[in-house]
């Protein structure tokens, strides 16, 4: 059994398709390969091999000037007119004018940066970043000044939920426990143990009371429960407050990314496929427009959810 490739094992017992497949929507836009997506205003801001662009469902594509931003960009966050971007080298840049100009938030702060930024989000009116060494930093002035936030361990991943704020996956200092901390920085912050530290990667999604993460064994867990038959996760997103999870999972055997939907208490079902150069790099649930954006070497696509998302 140890010799069986996970991808081949998945093909042996393929996932079933949902009764209603999701269809691609919106006007096609040629932006090139996509490395990061952030929902913003009427659409999304995407990082591509050509730079940053603002895209909407009507087909509008506005290239951002992004003066001062180093490339390539591998992480994005947006809030109002503010944008935060992480480069491949781990440097964090911030714009306060909708992407016209950027400045480095790390310059002259090498020791504080702790090896560079790994994740960045906006939550509760502040900018939060997780460094590659596992430090959690917060800035209330768009990266001019930073404050270290103690979470009693190493920050393994961060995510954000509109209602509960910042969610942090924390590995205890002993290295044998993992906790999910919800609402970090708030008076009503809470914490719950989820899984052994060596069973979790940095891939995480949070919404309402639900947290999903990618396991080191190549699978996915949601609220501490393993999701059956899902391997090679690339990105995660919750579709609703009931815990319906969307997973972008890759099949190496045919280089295809499947969008797999898992309703609470239900079996995983494929709702869409992206074939050919199908390794997804970013996934975003756009609540304002009722679509899911997915990006990768194949470009940028938007899918409209179909059918019932959650079981009763």
Image (tube, rainbow, N blue to C red):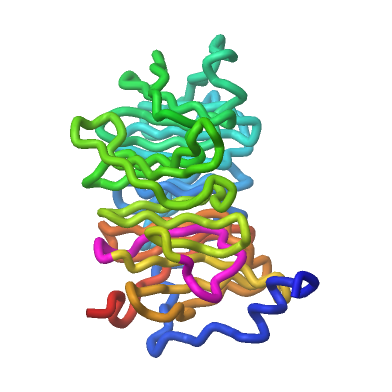
Decide: is 167 above or below 143.
below
Out of 47 and 239, give the one closest to the viewer: 239
- In the rendered structure, the answer to whether residue 252 lies left or right of residue 224 reads right
Which residue is located at x 56 percent, y 53 percent?
199
Q: Can residue 63 be seen from the camera position used here?
A: no
Out of 251 and 98, give the one closest to the viewer: 251
Q: Which residues are magenta?
A: 226-242
Which residue is located at x 33 percent, y 39 percent?
166
Pinpoint residue 300: horizontal percent, then vertical percent. 51, 60
Which residue is located at x 61 percent, y 64 percent?
232
**What residue occupies the far bottom of the structure in this picture?**
19
Quadrant holding the C terminus: bottom left
Pinpoint residue 89: horizontal percent, then vertical percent. 65, 31
Which residue is located at x 47 percent, y 73 percent?
260
- In the rendered structure, the answer to whether residue 259 lies left or right of residue 79 reads right
How many marks the image carries: the answer is 0
Res 1 → quadrant: bottom right
Pinpoint residue 70: horizontal percent, then vertical percent. 60, 29
Decide: is 46 above or below 17.
above
Pinpoint residue 306: horizontal percent, then vertical percent. 33, 79
Tell me, yes or no, whether the highlighted magenta stretch contains residue 75.
Answer: no
Decide: is 201 above or below 239.
above
Q: Can residue 179 be seen from the camera position used here?
A: yes
């Amino acid at each position: 059994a140890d010799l069986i490739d996970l991808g081949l094992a998945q093909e042996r017992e393929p996932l079933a398709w949902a009764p209603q497949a999701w269809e691609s929507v919106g006007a096609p836009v040629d932006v090139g390969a996509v490395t990061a997506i952030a929902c913003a205003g009427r659409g999304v801001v995407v990082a591509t091999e050509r730079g940053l662009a603002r895209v909407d469902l009507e087909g509008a594509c506005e290239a951002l000037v992004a003066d001062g931003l180093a490339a390539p960009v591998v992480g994005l966050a947006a809030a109002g007119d503010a944008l935060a971007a992480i480069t491949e080298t781990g440097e964090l840049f911030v714009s306060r004018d909708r992407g016209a100009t950027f400045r480095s938030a790390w310059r002259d702060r090498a020791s504080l940066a702790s090896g560079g930024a790994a994740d960045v989000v906006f939550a509760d009116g502040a900018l939060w970043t997780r460094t590659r060494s596992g430090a959690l930093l917060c800035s209330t002035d768009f990266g001019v000044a930073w404050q270290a936030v103690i979470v009693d361990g190493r920050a393994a991943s961060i995510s954000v939920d509109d209602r509960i704020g910042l969610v942090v996956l924390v590995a205890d200092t002993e290295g044998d426990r993992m906790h999910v901390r919800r609402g970090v920085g708030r008076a009503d912050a809470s914490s719950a143990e989820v899984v052994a530290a060596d069973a979790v990667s940095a891939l995480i999604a949070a919404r309402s009371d639900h947290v999903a993460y990618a396991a080191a064994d190549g699978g996915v867990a949601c609220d501490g429960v393993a999701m059956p038959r899902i391997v090679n996760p690339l990105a995660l997103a919750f579709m609703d407050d009931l815990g319906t999870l969307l997973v972008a999972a890759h099949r190496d055997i045919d280089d295809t990314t499947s969008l797999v939907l898992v309703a609470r208490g239900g079996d995983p079902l494929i709702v869409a496929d992206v074939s050919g150069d199908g390794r997804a790099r970013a996934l975003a649930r756009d609540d304002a427009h009722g679509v899911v954006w997915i990006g990768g070497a194949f470009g940028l696509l938007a899918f409209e959810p179909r059918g019932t998302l959650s079981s009763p």
